Image (tube, rainbow, N blue to C red):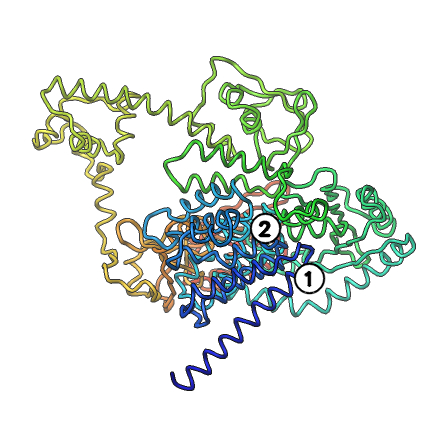
Amino acid sequence: MDDDQMKREAADDKMINDAFQHLLDTYLASRHRKKVDIITKAFNFARQAHKGVRRLSGEPYIMHPIAVAQIACEEVGLGSTSICAALLHDVVEDTDYTTEDIENIFGPKIAQIVDGLTKISGGIFGDQASAQAENFKKLLLTMSDDIRVILIKICDRLHNMRTLASQPANKQYKIAGETLYIYAPLANRLGLNKIKTELEDLSFRYEHPDAYASIESKLASTQASRHTLFDQFTTPIEKALDKMGIQYVIKERVKSPYSIWNKMQNKHVTFEEIYDILAVRIIFTPKDRANEINECFNIYVAISKIYKSHPDRLRDWLNHPKANGYQALHVTLMSKQGRWIEVQIRSDRMDEVAEQGFAAHWKYKEAENGGDGASDNDNELNDWLHTIKEILDDPQPDAMDFLDAIKLNLFSSEIFVFTPKGEIKTMPAGCTALDFAFSIHTFLGSHCIGAKVNHKLVPLSHKLKSGDQVEILTSKSQHVQPSWINFASTAKAKAKIQAILRREGREIQKQGEEVLNAFLKQNDITPTNSTIDQLATFHDVEKREDFLQALGEKTIILGEKDIDELNGKKPKEVKGWRKFVPFLKSNKEKKEEETSSELFVVPDKFNRKKPVFVTDANIKQYKFMHCCHPIPGDDILGFIDNKKQIEIHKRSCPVATKLKSSYGNRILDAKWDMHRKVFFDATVQMQGTDRIGLLNEVTQIISNQMNVNIHKVTITCDEGIFNGSLELRVHDREDVQSIVESLRKVDGIQEVSQIR
């Protein structure tokens, strides 16, 4: 062994020992019972198991399990069992040790959690489609056994996101997309607010580096003015609280870059137009724990004497905590500078629950009973797990639907609805009367014909608001309708409706099968799968099941032409009016014509780590998707579809988000290399107050100053307010931005935004 190698090994050992010592120090400073021996044993075992292995970044592999254990201990507040499981979480997957070995050395509890973590991560980078959604299923199944599995998995994901820089770009998009789609909502649902925010910001940073850097620099440049505003606003509040003899701290909360960007996208506003970048938190230590809710309201009364409060913006999460355990009182006050500022009032216990979620619940329970595990009294969590179990009990054919169903259930905003007897039910915001019916009972949902909301008759699609009293009306003759899926919004309702429709669909398919068999028997043809597929293709139906369903529903009637098709006879010459209309082609001919253009097909030995460059010359070789209309200047990625052709999506496109979560290994890094030769469609929307000559001014700016071709203009005017949309032919995103900025300066125009 040469000197350099020895030096490197000595440096590695020091780094590993320092990291582990830091972990032990953090653990010893926590409220948990001190089980240092078992943690040291787990560390030594994992260190030996991963000996000689390095991560992509070049550091020894054991640094990753230590970092995950550090996050679990310091940021989620978990105890020794979880710390050991975090240290051992990759041992079974990456080395020759088995779960049985772990159980023999560390006991059944740690082994069960490690086994749960191994089940989740197995095959995440596998080639099978929908791998991630399948893993998510496993994740939730294991989670039902022990919530700590999911908490450690979130810590693992957070460390992977913090070290994502060492991965190639296509892997970065896959992992970041998956994080936004699965792990950030999960962290939010478990009340891990700080971790949720960091996961979102890290994903945003890798997917949209320019937008992230721009928001970061704007936040930095407005920091001084924010501090001044904060100091001026809080000085009188501090005086009032001191006078009341309350022990408190006042913190400045700055909106995260991701949530600022999200608001800019959804509300079509600029950074300068976002008012709630600054919020104020008052965190107090209650004089009497049993009375902390009253103390929150006393503080509210005191500060609303200083500043005028916004009547519609009082949020009481004290008496009705969010499903993730969050409790606080939110009030919006008008500062002396003429700005609305949100103030969040919460006790120190509520603050800890807000930051650490369910782990903090346990901490308070452990402090009472001296245990080191979860209590079963977390009703909200148990309700949630129960819903997930129901969805898992009725497996769905498409794992993506499953993921969506779970995602719907990770709701963060909720409403409270009353039953006719006055019982409170928590429902997700935006839910309908139909969702409410299914949340009570499947029978009630499937036979529901309408509802009475606050004693008024409403349809099933009626959206409920907080405080509504809902009575469901049923009829025995009512059956589940396919259209219901469009206005059901909760996971439970969607899953039940789909299950019932599938069951009924299977019965119709059976009838279709009988019709088909009778027809084939009559014509002396043996029924085989290839026969059915041939007929389905002939009738332009892709799936065998859909073809049988169409036969059962009698939307396809079999006849002589089907026999000719099966016997291989040429179709007779087209007769009647069709032959005089040459452009009226069948769907099949149209499809063939569309796909026959020279699209690039990915060869087997294609290097997926290298970026794909879209140039003026090769742009026709890629598929530009209508879901997001990417144009040069947008952050984009490539996706290899089932035909091995490359689709181009915006990185922020909702369809691409799903693809990243389920087919991550087919994601490619894509970059523009355009030289302003090709034109793209873009649509800009405007709104403002009408005046004579306004339209003329708008078209002058676009045609003369910008030299951009206007494709179509639509303007509607109602009582002096106009709404307009312009369809333009532009070269890239810069063209659109300069047009939007120029239009914003036109007198009378209030709002301008690009919709695609």
Instruction: Locate residue 384: give its quadrant.
Output: top right
* SS for callout 2: helix
What residue is pinned by disc 2? Answer: 267
Q: Is residue 430 left or right of residue 101?
A: right
755, above or below 468, in the image: below
| Residue 649 occupies quadrant | bottom left
**In the displayed structure, does residue 643 sit left or right of residue 28?**
left
Image position, residue 715 (x, y; %): 52, 46
Which x, y percent locates residue 101?
43, 53
Distance CA(mark 1)–CA(mark 2): 45 Å
Say which mark, if any, is on residue 710. none
Asked whether 440 or 592 is in front, the reply is 440
> Who's the residue at 35% across and 66% down the image?
611
Which residue is labeled 1 in the image? Answer: 29
Of 409 and 585, which appears nearest the observer?
409
Q: Amino acid at mark 1?
A: Ala
Q: Position of residue 144 (x, y in %)?
A: 52, 40
